[in-house]
Amino acid sequence: MSNLTWVLVRENTHEEVMVGDTITSFRGDTAVLKGGRPPHKPASTGRVFIEGAEYFPSVFDLKWIQKKGGVQ
């Protein structure tokens, strides 16, 4: 069994982003992160959820990475 878990991070700094954090789009709009869905296949980027909408993580300069960790 793998000890890798999906984590949402800022594209440039790799700082982990958590539900409730304020995120900023490439247009300068801010929103509160409500959740997300990591990639389900290699070609997918996953999604991030804000109030009433879902976006590609890149809209907010975010990306999903796999990180060693415990069982999620």
Image (cartoon, rainbow, N blue to C red):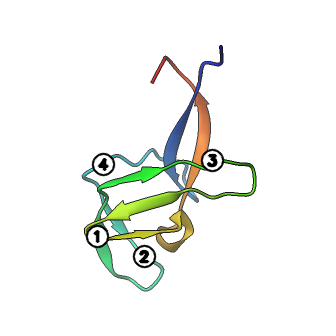
| SS assignment at label 2 | loop
Which circle's residue, 4 or 2, is located before the other in the chain?
A: 4
Q: The residue under label 2 is which amino acid type?
A: Ser
Quadrant assignment, res 5: top right
Using the image, tell me which numbered label, if any, was put on residue 31. Answer: 1
Q: Distance of mark 4 from mark 2, alpha carbons?
A: 16 Å
Foreground residue, 13 or 33? 33
Mark 1 closeness class: few <14, some 14–19, many ≥20 residues within 10 Å: some
Foreground residue, 68 or 56? 56
Residue where numbered disc 3 is placed? 40
Q: Are marks 1 and 2 in contact (CB under 8 Å)?
A: yes
Tag nearer the camera, 4 or 2: 4
Q: Distance of mark 4 from mark 3, alpha carbons?
A: 20 Å
Residue where numbered disc 2 is placed? 25
Which circle's residue, 3 or 1, is located before the other in the chain?
A: 1
Q: The residue under label 1 is which amino acid type?
A: Ala
Q: How far across and down, in percent of the image, does residue 43 sit?
A: 74, 57
| SS assignment at label 1 | strand
Side (left or right) of 21 relative to 46: left
Q: Are marks 4 and 2 in contact (CB under 8 Å)?
A: no
Q: Distance of mark 3 from mark 1, alpha carbons?
A: 24 Å
Q: Distance of mark 1 from mark 2, alpha carbons?
A: 8 Å
Mark 2 closeness class: few <14, some 14–19, many ≥20 residues within 10 Å: some
Q: Are marks 4 and 1 in contact (CB under 8 Å)?
A: no
Which circle's residue, 3 or 2, is located before the other in the chain?
A: 2
Using the image, tell me which numbered label, if any, was put on residue 19. Answer: 4
Side (left or right) of 36 relative to 50: right
| SS assignment at label 3 | loop
Q: How far across and down, in percent of the image, does residue 34 sit?
A: 29, 56
Q: The residue under label 3 is which amino acid type?
A: His
Q: The residue under label 4 is which amino acid type?
A: Val
Which circle's residue, 4 or 1, is located before the other in the chain?
A: 4
